[in-house]
Amino acid sequence: MEALLTFDVIVPALGLMPRKLISSGSEFESKIGYSRAVVDGDYVFVSGTTGYNYDDMSISEDVVEQAEQCFQNIKKALAEAGSSFDEVVRVRYLYTDKCDFEPCWPVFAKYLGKSMPAATVVIVGLLDDQMKLEVEVTARLSS
């Protein structure tokens, strides 16, 4: 009888990592159909992340506090993926008001000052008027 080669046998044999999906537990992930982060190959792709505290589904009115919570949410996803802020290579900041960008600079420097990723800032409309920003990052897996 011949042995069948399955995905879980072939992928490790080729030195490839299977794709890993990471959830924050947000109800939006299952309703919309996305993951908080996806590990694919040597990279972690973290979805646009807002300042919601997923423990109690609250959000601050203060943009700097929202920025801090964004990075706390991203930190959890990166850790679960096996990465960290030191490995971030790309960041996208999505703001509803361009005047809110500069007050958040100290938060960004706190988390990304060492990795100094490529960055883009875009002014957008977000789905909930309480959301003042969304942050998306791409990171390498920790070596």
Image: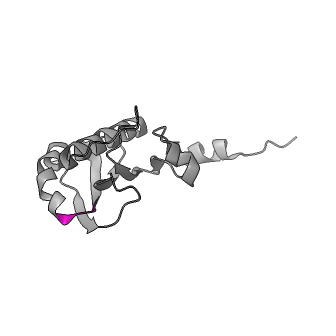
Q: Quadrant of the C terminus?
A: top left
Q: Nearer the viewer, residue 83 or 22?
A: 22
Tell me: residue 32, above or below residue 107.
Answer: below
Q: Nearer the viewer, residue 140 or 143?
A: 140
Residue 65 shows in the view: yes
> Residue 21 at x, y = what percent?
52, 44
What residue range appears in magenta? 94-98
> Residue 131 at x, y = what percent?
32, 53
Q: Is residue 122 left or right of residue 80?
A: left
> Residue 123 at x, y = what percent?
27, 68
Q: Is residue 82 left or right of residue 2?
A: left
The image quadrant that residue 24 belongs to is: top left
Q: Quadrant of the N terminus?
A: top right
Residue 143 shows in the view: no
Q: Residue sitting at 30 percent across and 45 percent down? A: 70
Q: Is residue 34 left or right of residue 134?
A: right
Q: Residue sitting at 37 percent across and 60 percent down? A: 126
- The reply to whether the magenta stretch includes residue 47 is no
Q: Is residue 121 left or right of residue 126?
A: left
Q: Residue sitting at 55 percent across and 54 percent down? A: 32
Q: What kind of colouring is applied to the model shown?
A: one colour
Tell me: residue 43, above or below residue 124.
Answer: above
* Residue at the outermost top position: 55
